[in-house]
Amino acid sequence: MIDIRLLREDPERVRVSQRARGEDVGVVDAVLDADARHRSSLSDYETLRAAQKSFGKKVAAAQGEEKQALLAEVKDTAARVKELEAAKDAAAEERESLLRTIGNVIIDGVPSGGEDDFALIETIGEPRDFAAEGFEPLDHLALGERLGAIDMARGAKVSGSRFYYLTGPGARLETALMNLALDRARDAGFVQLQVPTLVTPQTMAGAGFLDAHADEVYRLEADDLYLTGTSEVALAGFHADEIIDLTQGPRRYTAMSTCYRREAGSYGKDTQGIIRVHQFQKVEMFIYARPEDAEAEHEALLKWERGMLDDLGLAYRVIDVAAGDLGGPAARKFDCEAWVPTQGRYRELTSTSNCTTYQARRLNTRERGESGTRTVATLNGTLATTRFLVAILETHQQADGSVTVPEVLRPYTGFDAITPA
């Protein structure tokens, strides 16, 4: 969540951010009102509590009517202390509850608006002209089924809609992607973790995934645990309630995990193929950094993502995501969207978000500085995911129905092309 001190000192900045996100601006004043009531009640409570503690000696020294009067005063004071304690606690709870509804304050330069209001940063590569090559490209599902790489029918039979099997060369290609990404992350100084994919409500909420998008999350009610939609959640919780040392630079972690998303509200969208599914693999990068280093780390994450797409031979564009399309924890997000030939448009493959101190404040992750402890910044970015297969299969298909494997993946796959069975 955002720093209450920022809201007190510069409420207009928070209002501007809320307005850019298309969110409720009035919540800013509601938080300030609850905060004022809490601080007033707290002050009165502490003053009266101090007075209450002084009554002991007075009562012990008093006699007769004076003592009886003091005892009555003690009783009245105790009742008032309880009232003020309840008032301060209620105001604090209201303030915290309202504060959690406010998304991270966006960074200057983030475009306002919704999904279609992004700012284009750069377009890289030219989409293949299949018409000039003399053949009509197949979509990734038709290719995957013809090549024995994707089996949606059996996925639906076993688990229902939006599930699938990757088979033979498809499974091998996905594994190759994940291993390439993990090697790239290791070479960039990331420490690999194997993370839980079931987490507590405290961890899920701390990472910011139980606010506006709670309906996207799978919950195991009997165990009060959540299935994670990204290893970002477990990585964010890794240093919860800790003071970490960043004097030698940021701490960088990476993890490959199976991700689960309900895709609530996506009825009728991308029902064919593996673009919008309930389960997939992903390699995530996660960074703990000093707040003043966060923007530079964000650019570094984007560079590593772009390096993957460049080496996979994909045409793509980089966008600065509009405020209304940001998740609650993100102050800025860059997406890399690859060209999907049969759809004639760019589709998101990677995202990288600068969450500033939003997640770490919820999870109580701090660093020790010269003037005491302070909240750290957290950042995340996608280095590979199953959805990459969509762009790879469609972009690198050939007229004979085969798919050429990008050179960078061949040491991992053990084959140069996927050919029809």
Image: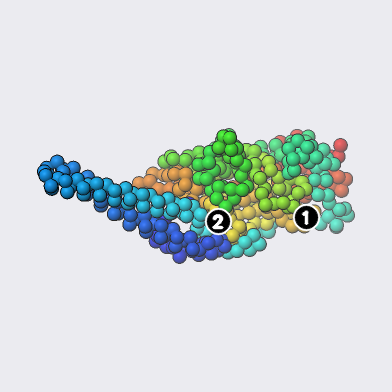
Q: Quadrant of residue 44?
A: bottom left
**Circle 1 Cα neighbour tier, 10 Å, few/some/many (<14 / 14–19 / ≥20):** few
Q: Position of residue 319 (x, y in %)?
A: 63, 58
What residue do we see at 50% from left, 56% from top?
A: 102
- Determine whether the residue tagged by mark 1 lies in a helix, strand or loop: loop
Residue 282 x, y percent position in the rendering: 64, 42
Quarter of the C terminus within the rendering: top right
Residue kind at label 1, given as amino acid type: Gln
* Nearer-N-terminus badge (1/2): 2
Instruction: Give the residue at mark 2.
Output: 332
Q: CA distance from mark 1 to mark 2?
A: 27 Å
Query: Residue, x 30% and y 54% (percent of image)?
Result: 43
**Residue kind at label 2, given as amino acid type:** Arg
Secondary structure state at the residue bearing disc 2: strand
Q: Nearer the viewer, residue 321 or 297?
A: 321
Q: Is residue 218 visible?
A: yes
Residue 129 found in image quarter: bottom right
308 or 253, nearer to the observer: 253
Look at 50% across and 48% down and name the residue there.
Answer: 359
* Residue 68 as seen in the image, left or right of residue 384: left
Within 10 Å of disc 2 (Cα), the crowding (few <14, some 14-19, many 20+) is many
Comparing 312 with 357, the one in front is: 357
Residue situated in front as seen by the camera: 84 or 101? 84
Label disc, if present, on residue 208 of the rendered structure: none
Residue 290 is left or right of residue 185, and the answer is left
Mark 1 — residue?
343
* The quadrant where residue 166 appears: top right
Q: Is residue 250 visible?
A: no
